Image: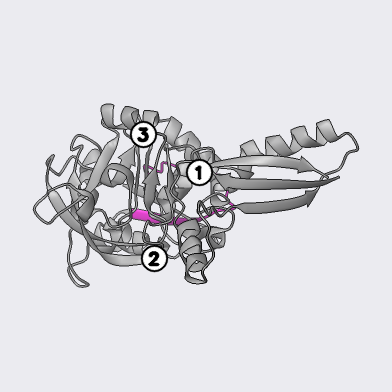
Amino acid sequence: MRVAVPVFPGSNCDHDALHACGTVMGWDTIPVWHQESRLPENTELVFVPGGFSYGDYLRCGAIAALAPIMADIKRHADNGGLVLGVCNGFQILCEAHLLPGALLRNESLRFIHTDVHLRVERANLPFTRAMKAGEVFQVPIAHAEGNFTLDPAELADLEARGGVAFRYCSPTGEIGEDHVPNGAMNGIAGIVNLRGNVLGMMPHPERAVDPKIGPTGGLGIFRSLGSAV
Amino acid sequence: MKVRVSVQLKPGILDPQGKAVEQGLHGFGFEVEHVRIGRLIEMDVPGTDPVEVKAKALAMCEKLLVNPVMEKASIEVL
């Protein structure tokens, strides 16, 4: 599989993405500078990494969403190509209108860095097909703006169409406010677009894939992607 | 012409920063409520017709300055 990792000024999880996709999964993984106008030929997955693109100026992800490479990422998504945005990558995809909603400041006002449990809400996606619906996995979060927000009517629509991919939960899979670290509406940790080929999530699966470093709760997503293309 | 765009969180959108500042003001004994924090953007826009300049600023809001999911803006041509 060929993976492109767009790198913006201020991206700092690009090397985690390159490590997970390149070293751990063994995929042909290519960093792409944000000023490039084209993705590498035959790119199958675009992994928009986390960080603080453009210093989070104006709004998180707002300036990165205008970078030259984003036009080609939109074209890739329009053609059905896979796009995974993690943390700041999720914020960028929302600002680029590839996904609905916005990520507000955490309810606590604090930057939160901790392990969380996620429940798989949609198991038939290219990102989740190696997992089961209701399956619980553990991955880290590290963000100050992860409080997913959407207009109530659009939120109802997102839920009704199965647009929620992952929800924060207890270690045994229970859903509830107590298990939501950042105030996100309906405990939403990750969403997909209508077509199911663009997924954004605040937690970092790419930081939980290498047994040499630590737990491997994020592997399910990468195994799914490996079997998707 | 000088243009001032004031960006505010929409009503109903949680503003934890505003809440924290409100609590800080309470700590000093000020009686305040509904503190909301926004952003003020000032710029020089070429043109002499205030209606035209305002239309340009509105287009800027739609393209970049405002995220309509959570924010609204008011535009002042000075």
Q: Residues within 10 Å of mark 2 (few under 14, many from 20)?
A: few
For disc 2, the marked residue is: A110
Q: Secondary structure at mark 2?
A: loop
Up-down relation of residue A101 to residue A117 (above or below): above
For disc 1, the marked residue is: A95
**Residue A134 picture location, percent across and down:** 12, 42
Q: Main secondary structure of the magenta part?
A: loop
Say which residue appears at 20% left-offset and 37% top-offset.
A122
Say which residue appears at 33% left-offset and 56% top-offset.
A182
Q: Secondary structure at mark 1?
A: helix
Per the rendered image, the range of residues in magenta is: A28-45
Q: Are marks 1 and 3 on the same chain?
A: yes
Identity, as a three-letter code, of the amino acid under mark 1: Glu
**Residue A2 picture location, percent across and down:** 36, 48
Gap between marks 2 and 3 measured at Cα = 29 Å
Of circles 2 and 1, the one toward us is 2
Of circles 2 and 3, the one toward us is 2
Disc number placed over residue A193 in the picture, else none: 3
- Sequence order check: which comes first, mark 2 or mark 1? 1
Disc 2 + disc 3, Cβ < 8 Å: no
Quarter-wise, where is residue A151 in the image? top left
Gap between marks 1 and 3 measured at Cα = 14 Å
Give left or right: position of A123 versus A43: left
**Residue A32 picture location, percent across and down:** 49, 54
